[in-house]
């Protein structure tokens, strides 16, 4: 009976691992860059069925703040990357999937960010899924709203995290102090009890010896 339970547990775990093997997270890109620094424009699109072969090409577009239309700024195909806009010439690097045509990470890196880089960015995955008898084409798009500032500012999440860290440290120190006081009192109480027991034992020994002496003296008389 136990072996059956073990087998069922093994099969359940195997099934769980199989389902999670193809899991893929799609975190949002950061949205604030600093003048003069580099910045990663994140763009991820997970392929839902990992067992299906696929190829993908990527296109990036940019709409500057105050503008109406998007302009193409970057492409990435099996032939390699290509910067499509003079404003970003020599300032864009591929930061996505490497050594694979099955692209799921299409992130790019902006070098030497300027205030004019503020705006809306959009990346497109043009993906071809290769099934046994046919091909299926999908297009996935992601949008990043980028703000460029002259100096880095700390976000609320960062401040809260730091405050929570200090609160945790102080709480641990207080807890440690309480534990030390408790242990000291417990050891001290145990020591006092041991001294009392030793004193009682010594008193009983002296009393017993005195009693024996008295009994001997009476017999002698």
Image: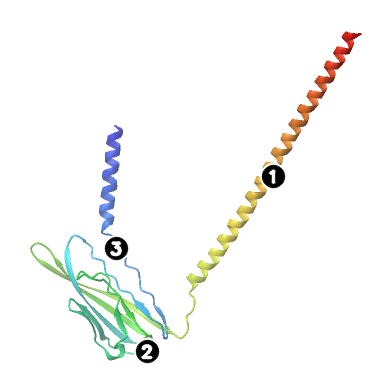
Tell me if residue 46 comes above or below residue 184 in the rendering: below
Q: How far apart in space, not on screen, are marks 3 and 1 (Cα)?
A: 54 Å
> Residue 113, position in %: x, y?
38, 85
Q: Which mark is residue 24?
A: 3
Observer-nearest of 179 and 58: 179
> Residue 117, position in %: x, y?
36, 86
Write the residue at 46% across / 86% down.
150
Tell me if residue 176 comes above or below residue 160 in the rendering: above
Give the mark nearest the N terminus, 3 or 1.
3
Judged from the image, the secondary structure of the residue bearing numbered disc 2 is helix
Q: How far apart in space, not on screen, are marks 1 and 2 (Cα)?
A: 67 Å
> In the visual, does 28 lie left or right of 178?
left
Judged from the image, the secondary structure of the residue bearing numbered disc 3 is loop
Give the mark nearest the N terminus, 2 or 3.
3
- Quadrant of the rendering where the C terminus is positioned: top right
Observer-nearest of 104 and 67: 104
Give the mark nearest the N terminus, 1 or 2.
2
How is the protein colored in the picture?
rainbow
Q: Which mark is residue 116?
A: 2
Residue 84, quarter of picture: bottom left
């Amino acid at each position: 009976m136990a072996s059956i339970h073990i087998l069922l547990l093994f099969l359940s775990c195997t099934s769980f691992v199989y389902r999670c093997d193809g899991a893929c997270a799609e975190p949002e890109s950061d949205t604030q860059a600093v003048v003069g620094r580099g910045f990663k424009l994140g763009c991820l699109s997970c392929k839902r069925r990992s067992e299906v072969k696929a190829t993908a090409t990527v296109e990036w577009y940019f709409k500057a703040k105050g503008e109406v239309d998007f302009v193409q700024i970057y492409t990435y195909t099996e032939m390699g990357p290509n910067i499509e806009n003079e404003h970003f010439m020599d300032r864009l690097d591929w930061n996505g999937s490497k050594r694979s045509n099955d692209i799921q990470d299409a992130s790019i890196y902006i070098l030497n960010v300027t205030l004019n880089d503020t705006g809306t960015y959009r990346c497109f995955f043009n993906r071809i899924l290769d099934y046994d008898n046919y091909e299926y084409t999908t297009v996935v798009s992601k949008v990043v709203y980028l703000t460029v500032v002259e100096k880095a500012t700390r976000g609320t999440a960062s401040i809260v995290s730091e405050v929570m860290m200090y609160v945790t440290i102080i709480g641990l120190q207080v807890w440690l102090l309480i534990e030390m006081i408790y242990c000291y009192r417990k050891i001290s109480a145990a020591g006092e009890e041991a001294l009392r027991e030793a004193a009682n034992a010594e008193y009983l020994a002296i009393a017993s010896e005195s009693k024996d002496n008295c009994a001997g003296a009476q017999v002698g008389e």
